[in-house]
Image (spheres, rainbow, N blue to C red):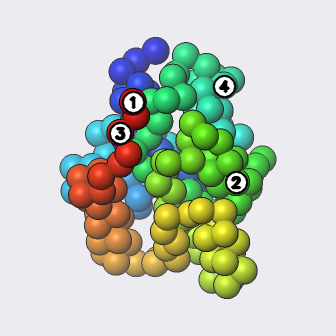
Amino acid sequence: MDDAVKMVEILLVEDNPNDAELAIRALKKNNLANKLVWVKDGAEALDFIFATGSYSGRNVENGPKVILLDLRLPKVDGMEVLRRIKGDERTKMIPVVVLTSSKEDQDVIESYKLGVNSFISKPVEFDAFSKVVAELGLYWLLINQPPVHH
């Protein structure tokens, strides 16, 4: 297994290639995308996070520094992915940022109940999106102090 998958900093869970491309471009522009893995549905996200299926060579403990999670996903929806991440001792400390085009209050409330760290409505315009993603990346990768595992 290549080191890229071992040393992931950002896991992008997004089924829409246009939105994913935007996020990746925004992160690249800010030099934050070199350790990014993009998965396209909730089932693949869970495989990656919990090192099962095609990602069984990974170490669960070696999780991403931040997960950018779309809520509207095929196979397993984003809420379920969030529920599983936050419900597992090994992964509940990973910051999860929900990126969604949903403006539903219920989604926001539910996400926070499940322990999401941040909730962002996808701005459609690239510069705005780029700025949000860059700030997120800088914050979670550089400024935020994660708990140290002993």
- The image position of residue 105, as x and y in percent, is 67, 84
Where is 67 relative to 148, above or below? below
Task: Please indicate whether residue 31 sits to the left or right of residue 148 in the image.
Answer: left
Res 83 label = 2
First in residue order: circle 2 vs circle 1: 2
CA–CA distance between discs 3 and 1? 6 Å
Callout in the foreground (1, 4): 1
Q: CA distance from mark 1 to mark 4?
A: 24 Å
- In the image, what residue type sits under mark 2? Arg
Report the front residue among 138 and 132.
Answer: 138
* Residue type, label 4: Thr
Mark 1 or mark 4, earlier in chain: 4
Mark 2 surroundings: few (<14), some (14-19) or many (≥20) residues within 10 A: some
Query: Circle 4 — which element?
Result: loop
- Judged left or right of residue 75, residue 84 is left
- Helix, strand or loop status at disc 2: helix
Dot 1 corresponds to which residue? 150
Mark nearer the viewer, 2 or 3: 3
Instruction: Judge from the rendering whether residue 117 lies leftward or rightward of residue 70; answer left or right.
Output: left
Residue 61 higher or lower than 46, as above or below: above
